[in-house]
Image: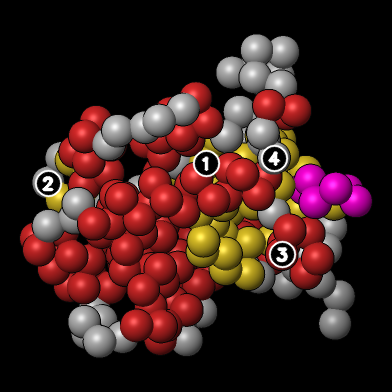
Amino acid sequence: MSLQLFPSSVFSYDQAREVLIQLLGQCQRKLNQADWRQAYECLVVLEDEHEMADWIADTALFSYRGRRRAIDRILPKLKTSDGLAERLKDGLGNACFSVFEIVRIDSDSRILLKDLLDDARELTMVDHALARSGRPGGVFAARLLDAGPWHMGLGIVVVVRKSAAVALGMLLDREGREGLHELIYHCELHDIDLATAVVMPVLEELCEQFDQSPQPVAELLQTLRRPGGPLGAWPPFDR
């Protein structure tokens, strides 16, 4: 939706935030036991782990169970009273969990971001807390909603190291982000290195290809180390 058709002066961030919290509350109240059970099982958490409430609710709403998400079943049943609520309701259905890099933070809490899993697409987010704590060059994972003139978060913001962001950016794209929420959750919860968790399946596949290759090891190394090959510049940094 263009800025001309939906100018920022129509509503404030605080107004949108209040309405969004109300909508998310309605959505959570419409979750059934199967939705909650899947979230607990997916994240491997117990029902009394209240400190994980935002993660569990997000998983229950947005993770696929079969071919459908709970949010897709619930949103058509919500009744909205005004244009702002209707706009945010539409935005909830398309809210996306991704990895973002901060480009610039303006004095009015507007944050220019690049979506690292969507060809570095630029977008503007408004968030008072992140505007205070974030820095240009910082990287984080979050689920963002398009509110019209800017985007806003749905409550979960996780700082991501550059190495993990590079690994995710190399191996995931816009169509491959499903399940990213659960991956980051598990790595954060169990102190697993996110970059390793992302890259390891690729390394295991590469090792299997080496083991099954009819080429002698000397020839494999020569191929890998030739200029322009994967190991041609190894080690990558001067010691």
What span is in magenta? 106-111
Q: Which residue is mark 3?
A: 129
- The residue drawn where x is 46% and y is 53% is 21
Q: Quadrant of the C terminus?
A: bottom right
Look at label 4 and name its amino acid: Ser
Residue 177, given in percent of the width and then of the height, sits at 42, 47
Residue 12 tag number:
4
Look at label 1 and name its amino acid: Leu
Q: Earlier in the sequence, mark 2 or mark 1?
A: 2
Query: Could you tell me if residue 206 is visible in this image?
Result: no
Q: Earlier in the sequence, mark 4 or mark 2?
A: 4
- Callout 4 secondary element: loop
Look at label 2 and name its amino acid: Gly
Q: CA distance from mark 4 to mark 3?
A: 16 Å
Is 109 covered by the magenta stretch? yes
Question: Do callouts 3 and 2 mark residues in contact (Cβ within 8 Å)?
Answer: no
Q: CA distance from mark 1 to mark 4?
A: 15 Å
- Callout 3 secondary element: helix
Is 47 covered by the magenta stretch? no
Q: Which residue is mark 2?
A: 66
Residue 128 in which image quadrant: bottom right
Q: Which residue is mark 1?
A: 145
